[in-house]
Amino acid sequence: MNKIINLTLKVWRQKNAQSQGRFETYKAEGIDTAMSFLEMLDVVNERLTKEGREPIAFDHDCREGICGACGAVINGRPHGPLKGTTLCQLHMRHFKDGQTLVIEPWRAGGFPVLKDLAVDRSAFDRVMQAGGFISVKTGQACDTNAVAVPKDKADTAMDTAECIGCGACVAACPNASAMLFVAAKVVHLNILPQGEVEKDRRALNMVKQMDAEGFGNCSNAYQCEAACPKEISVEHIARLNKYHRQATRQD
């Protein structure tokens, strides 16, 4: 059964990338527990707008847990308290009446704050441009199952393909590492026959670009796996390290 709850929000407000941010406190009153977290922010913003105040800026797009656009840290946890859930799919029934929520943007040097909760995640785009694709000519689309792929490799490719590039792994890591994201993208392509031709160059270039963007290395904290809304395993970081080590020897 739906309930109506009242919350206190401590939200990070920052005018732009150059300005210094601060927390501001707002009341979120009369919130239906059937709302998503983003819909709750919509309600708060509607009230702020009616009062002639600046609404809270935050990233969002599909609101179906698919695009990876949304993201914020709630009480210290990227995407909030519910495991395997994006911010847009997090519903207010998981919070208590009277609770105080501290809402911050992703915190990482590679993700500079643009405004309030919105951060610049274009670093991930540049990592993908460095090798997260298949450029070799594979001819016309072939019939289904014409290229045989072992079941275990197909499962691994599907698991890693679930990465939506939201950046929660970076926000959760004490070293702001992007290795779970890069590992998912590299393994997804390297483990399939179509991606094997470029596997060495892909691993080298994407890791090189990841380092150039200022992301840290894996510190074995496992926080990335805990925060990932698609529950991608850290075991793929080991696969990335293996691919990179083999490519370095070949280079």
Image (cartoon, rainbow, N blue to C red):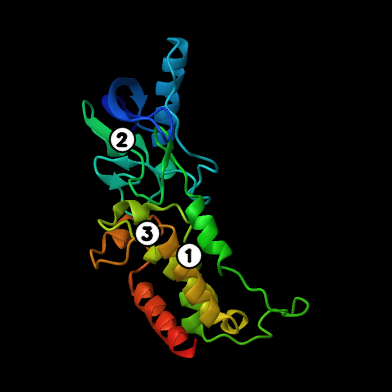
Q: Which residue is mark 3?
A: 215
**Residue occupying the point 50% across, 39% down:** 60
Name the secondary structure under disc 1.
helix
| Residue 81 shows in this picture | no
Q: Locate residue 29, reporting x and y percent.
A: 32, 19
Left or right of 115 in this view: 200: right
In this rendering, is residue 174 above or below 143?
Answer: above
Give the Cα distance between marks 2 and 3: 23 Å
Name the quadrant containing residue 225. Answer: bottom left
Residue flagged by tag 3: what amino acid is it?
Phe
Q: Locate residue 228, reporting x and y percent.
A: 36, 57
In this rendering, is residue 107 above or below 214?
Answer: above
Which of the numbered marks, if any, corresponds to residue 209? Answer: 1
**Residue occupying the point 48% across, 54% down:** 123
| Disc 3 residue crowd, few under 14, some 14–19, many 20+, Cα 10 Å | many
Most extreme residue toward the bottom is 250
Name the secondary structure under disc 3.
loop
Give the Cα distance between marks 1 and 2: 30 Å
Residue flagged by tag 2: what amino acid is it?
Ile
Mark toward the viewer: 2 or 3: 3
Residue flagged by tag 1: what amino acid is it?
Gln
Comes first in the chain, label 2 or label 3: 2
Q: Which residue is mark 2?
A: 103
Name the quadrant containing residue 62. Answer: top right
Left or right of 223 in this view: 189: right
Mark toward the viewer: 1 or 2: 1
Comes first in the chain, label 3 or label 1: 1
| Disc 2 residue crowd, few under 14, some 14–19, many 20+, Cα 10 Å | many
